Amino acid sequence: MTRWGMVIDTDRCTGCGACIVACHAENNIQTVGDAEAARGRAMHWIRVERYYEGEFPDVKVRFMPVMCQQCGAAPCEPVCPVYATYRTPEGLNAMVYARCIGTRYCANNCPYTVRFFNWFGGEFPEPLERQLNPDVAKRPAGVMEKCTFCVQRIQDAESVAKDEDREVRDGDIKTACSQTCPAEAITFGDLSDPESRVSVLAGLERSERLLEDLSTEPSVIYLKGGR
Ligand code: SF4
């Protein structure tokens, strides 16, 4: 059974932020502006965390892109009173926006703080609405939203593979962030296929998962920086 996953090489990430812009464009994510961001209402399905290693003057700056970790044992799922978030057979932590009633229990229970409450409903005044992705619905105010590994792209590739009477091939699907990253720091694929590129990278010695001790079983694997 497919288990979609992602490997992020922090040695390659330069912190440029292109993945954030690509994610906004692909998924019709609103921008809330400085004032609302300062009130804790920022909306980015992927963020780039930065931290420092070493002591001055031998200090190294590190970057770590963080999005929904698509946990195998997701803390957000059991606390949703209306089953708006659930695990799919392919290992995605899916969102049913039409069911969400905005209690925000899921966001409070997510240790990765990757769920965002839609406060404003997303205004895209002319001519901005022309850049909206027709494959992704605009979310109304009052629902939680988050990364779903560009599920619309996954479904599209699965549909093409079905039409051609074949399986989805490794590399057929690129999420918006992995497609855009100029450093090729993000790799997407099927973790259940031992020969896929993500599986090979996930097997490297420098792989680790974020907050592994919580036993959330994330599907996002980070490669530690060694530069
Ligand atoms: S686009 Fe790539 S290099 Fe730039 S911040 Fe994102 S992951 Fe890092």
Image (cartoon, grey):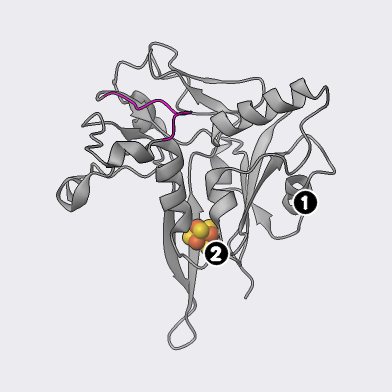
| Among numbered discs 2 and 1, the one appearing first in the sequence | 2
Query: Is residue 111 shown left or right of residue 149?
Result: left
- Image disc number at residue 203: 1
- Image disc number at residue 13: 2
Q: Residues within 10 Å of mark 1 (few under 14, many from 20)?
A: some
Q: In this picture, is 165 found above or below 53?
A: above
Query: Is residue 170 shown left or right of residue 129?
Result: right
Q: Amino acid at mark 2?
A: Cys
Residue 84: quarter of image: top left
**SS majority, magenta:** loop
Magenta stretch in the rendered image: 133-140
Residue 61, percent from left and from top: 47, 73
Q: In this picture, is 84 found above or below 125?
A: above
Residue drawn at (46%, 49%) of the image: 22
Residue 147, percent from left and from top: 47, 36
Give the alpha-carbon distance from disc 2 to disc 1, as whole Å.
19 Å
Q: Amino acid at mark 1?
A: Gly
Query: Is residue 117 shown left or right of residue 151?
Result: left
Figure disc tally: 2
